[in-house]
Image (cartoon, rainbow, N blue to C red):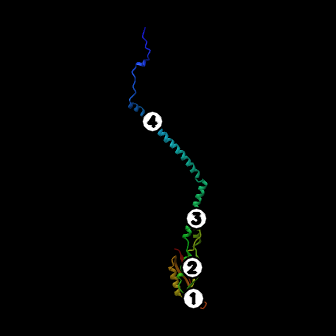
Amino acid sequence: MRAVNLLPPNAYAPKQRLPHAPVVLAATAPVLAGALVYLGYSFEHSKVVSRQSQLGLVQSEVAALAPSPQLASESAAVAAERVARTSALQDALSDRIPWDLTFDRLARVMPEGSWLATLSATSPTPSTSTTSGGPVSPTGFTVQGYADSQATVAHVLARFALVPGLSNVTLNNTTTTIIGTKSVTQFTLSAQVGS
């Protein structure tokens, strides 16, 4: 009879040894590195998605707070009106004549023995007033007054010429007249008003 081996075929095979630690480490290192990269990517991607959703919320809130087109057009109209009014005010103030200051200066320079009876202001020609589009300030004035003598009239003329803001002070005419029982000289002066 023949001999039959009942043992499994590997029973006599030499036992295999486990691979060395460096080989195992070299084989698992790329897998671990890939896993770490994947985990880092997933974590950062979730942060980006969260921030993008927050940005979307903030942008929607900003859009809700933005002025409506009607409000923007009204704001532009108000700004344009403000500029126009400021310009008109500056034009008016630049043409303003400080009459109170001018009258105060005239009163201070009037020599003794003279007084003013009338003062009338003159304006530029109407063609100038229509081109500027606004009210036109007087540019000159004429005064009529009385003095004790011709020498006093000369003093009035000389002192008016010293008043700041007056120019081209000229004597228009003089006449001798009687007021009550006293003989006085009536005079008419004209001057240009300006800075």
Q: Nearer the viewer, mark 1 or mark 4?
A: 4
Residue 134 position in % (x across, y down):
59, 68
Reading the image, the residue beneath label 3 is: 85
Rounded to the nearest angstrom, the CA distance separating label 3 from label 4 is 72 Å
Q: Amino acid at mark 2?
A: Thr
Quadrant where the N terminus sits is top left
Q: Nearer the viewer, mark 2 or mark 3?
A: 3
Residue at coordinates 42% horizontally, 34% vertically from top-left? 30
The reply to whether callout 1 and callout 4 are in contact (CB within 8 Å) is no
Q: Is residue 176 above or below residue 63?
A: below
Reading the image, the residue beneath label 2 is: 142
Reading the image, the residue beneath label 1 is: 184
Q: Earlier in the sequence, mark 3 or mark 4?
A: 4
Q: Which of 133 and 42 lies nearest the eye of the viewer?
A: 42
Rounded to the nearest angstrom, the CA distance separating label 1 from label 3 is 51 Å
Rounded to the nearest angstrom, the CA distance separating label 1 from label 4 is 120 Å
Rounded to the nearest angstrom, the CA distance separating label 2 from label 1 is 19 Å
* SS assignment at label 4: helix
Residue 122 position in % (x across, y down):
58, 76
Reading the image, the residue beneath label 4 is: 34
Q: Which of 182 and 66 lies nearest the eye of the viewer?
A: 66
Q: Residues within 10 Å of mark 1 (few under 14, many from 20)?
A: some
How many numbered discs, if any? Answer: 4
Q: Which of 101 and 186 lies nearest the eye of the viewer?
A: 101
The reply to whether callout 3 and callout 4 are in contact (CB within 8 Å) is no
Q: Earlier in the sequence, mark 4 or mark 2?
A: 4
Q: Amino acid at mark 1?
A: Val
* SS assignment at label 2: strand
Q: Nearer the viewer, mark 4 or mark 2?
A: 4
